[in-house]
Amino acid sequence: MRGPRLDDPDLSLRLVFQHWPEVAAVFRAHGMACLGCPIAPFHTVIDACAEYGLDEITFRAALQAATVA
């Protein structure tokens, strides 16, 4: 069984933070309160970007960069 992929559009934010805790800094840098939010188990990166008015492609690139830094 393979693990989750950061680019999976259906991956919940809860799982994003669980598998890649280093990306929390990216969310904080963008003023996003997703870490610890009660909606995080249900929201995806797509949802969060829409909520905060961020370009999803640019934001995903920042998340990916944080995982390899």
Image (cartoon, rainbow, N blue to C red):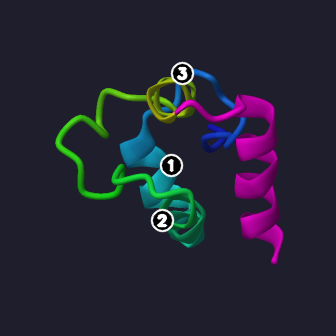
In the rendering, which numbered label is found on residue 28? 2
In the rendering, which numbered label is found on residue 41? none
Labels 2 & 1 near each other (Cβ < 8 A):
no
In the rendering, which numbered label is found on residue 10? 3
Structural distance between the alpha carbons of marks 3 and 2:
21 Å
Residue 46: percent from the left, percent from the top? 57, 25
Residue at the image point whose x is 46% and y is 58% from the top: 31
Structural distance between the alpha carbons of marks 2 and 1:
14 Å
Residue at the image point whose x is 56% and y is 30% from the top: 53
In the rendered structure, does residue 28 fall within the stretch colored magenta?
A: no
In the displayed structure, does residue 36 sit left or right of residue 28?
A: left
Look at label 3 and name its amino acid: Asp
- Label 3, residues with CA under 10 Å away: few <14, some 14-19, many ≥20: some
Residue 58: percent from the left, percent from the top? 80, 41
The first of marks 3 and 2 along the sequence is 3
Residue highlighted by disc 1: 16
Compare residues 42 and 49 and report the one nearer the observer: 49
Picture quadrant where residue 13 is located:
top left
- In the image, residue 56 sits, relative to residue 28, either above or below, namely above
Labels 3 & 1 near each other (Cβ < 8 A):
no
In the rendered structure, does residue 56 fall within the stretch colored magenta?
A: yes
